[in-house]
Image: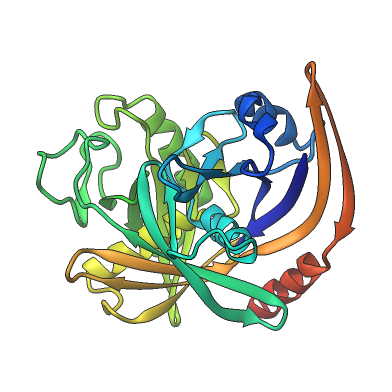
């Protein structure tokens, strides 16, 4: 099968278009994700992106984490799927589906020369059954979560997947790791797990670090950057309606939060193809071959160096 190694903001994936070959409907994708994502024995990635076609004709994304579990949504991944869907003519409607929700996507202005970008509108809920520490129907914005941390003020948001985010003066990765480990054992608070982010103010925007459920601390998480930007807008740290820079160790995206008619944040950023190739997966054996190096990865690294000088 054809594979594309791609990334959004340094969050790297192995992408497979399952719509062109009926045999791909019978692949054990969880096993494929565990083997292919392995950075020592496989290709290495933060997950697998499957381009799928639903019964009603809508195309969409199915993402699997490196441990083989499914993720409802991935802001960095859906931009890569959006690029493929545009290039192959799959999205005349401008809609992609992920985790049972429909997302409006569009081409965005290139971040820099040779770096294609796409954007996605992410509707955001301020309440969810993923959060058991406040009453249903309420919102939880800039408040302490009893039993998690005595002073950090979190905002809880659902972007198709659950997030809690808190502003800090300076990001402490040891603290972030401790919080991420703590929520794993707090099923009474987070019955389905949760992504945890800390963000700090920067000129023109914010900087974010994230502990992803199922993955740990990662270079980049698109929905976490979106959740952090949204929380900052709800708390008045940034202006609603303003396009702000949101950076992390993997690179930079741009977010614009609108509170009316419904809370929605537009996430825009790169969709970079590193290389294209092919893979075989049979009888527990995995083999792959790189066919074309796109050269886009080098352009992205030049961009990241330029913004971190």
Farthest top residue?
Answer: 283
Q: How is the image coloured?
A: rainbow
Along the viewing direction, whichever of 196 and 294 lies nearer the viewer: 294
Along the viewing direction, whichever of 132 and 5 lies nearer the viewer: 5
Residue 216 appears in the rendering: yes
Q: Quadrant of residue 302?
A: bottom right
Q: Quadrant of the N terminus?
A: top right
- Locate residue 35, reporting x and y percent: 73, 28
Q: Residue at x 67, y 47 (%)?
A: 15
Q: Residue at x 58, y 28 (%)?
A: 68
Q: Quadrant of residue 217?
A: top right
- Locate residue 127, reporting x and y percent: 19, 46
Along the viewing direction, whichever of 263 and 95 lies nearer the viewer: 95
- Vertical order, 246 against 181 (above or below): below
Q: Residue at x 60, y 63 (%)?
A: 83
- Locate residue 132, reporting x and y percent: 20, 33
Q: Quadrant of the C terminus?
A: bottom right
- Vertical order, 307 against 288 (above or below): below
Task: Report the side of 284 relative to 149 (left or right).
Answer: right
Task: Report the side of 114 relative to 174 (left or right).
Answer: right
Task: Report the side of 173 relative to 144 (left or right).
Answer: right
Residue 168 appears in the rendering: no
Along the viewing direction, whichever of 41 and 175 lies nearer the viewer: 41
Q: Quadrant of residue 181?
A: top left
- Locate residue 245, reporting x and y percent: 47, 76
- Vertical order, 108 against 227 (above or below): below
């Amino acid at each position: 099968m054809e594979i594309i190694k791609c990334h959004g903001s340094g969050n790297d994936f192995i992408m497979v278009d399952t719509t062109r070959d009926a045999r791909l409907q019978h692949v054990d994708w969880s096993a494929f994700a565990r083997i292919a994502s392995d950075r020592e024995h496989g290709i290495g990635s933060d997950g697998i992106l499957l381009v799928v076609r639903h019964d009603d004709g809508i195309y969409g994304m199915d993402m699997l984490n490196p441990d083989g579990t499914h993720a409802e949504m991935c802001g960095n991944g859906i931009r890569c799927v959006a690029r493929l869907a545009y290039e192959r003519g799959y999205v005349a409607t401008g809609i992609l589906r992920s985790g049972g929700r429909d997302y409006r996507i569009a081409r965005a202005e290139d971040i820099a020369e040779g770096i294609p970008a796409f954007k996605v509108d992410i509707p955001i809920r301020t309440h969810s059954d993923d959060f058991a520490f406040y009453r249903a129907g309420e919102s939880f914005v800039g408040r302490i979560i009893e039993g998690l941390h005595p002073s950090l003020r979190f905002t809880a948001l659902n972007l198709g997947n659950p997030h809690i985010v808190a502003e800090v003066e300076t990001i402490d990765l040891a603290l972030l790791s401790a919080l991420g480990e703590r929520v794993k054992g707090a099923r009474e608070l987070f019955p389905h797990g949760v992504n945890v982010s800390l963000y700090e103010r920067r000129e023109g925007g914010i900087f974010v670090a994230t502990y992803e459920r199922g993955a740990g601390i990662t270079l980049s998480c698109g929905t976490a950057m979106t959740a952090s930007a949204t929380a900052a807008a709800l708390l008045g740290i940034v202006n609603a309606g303003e396009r702000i820079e949101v950076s992390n160790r993997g690179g930079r995206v741009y977010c614009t939060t609108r509170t009316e008619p419904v809370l929605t944040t537009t996430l825009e950023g790169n969709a970079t193809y590193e290389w294209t190739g092919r893979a075989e997966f049979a009888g527990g054996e995995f083999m792959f071959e790189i066919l074309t190096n796109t050269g886009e990865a080098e352009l992205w690294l030049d961009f990241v160096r330029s913004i971190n000088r």
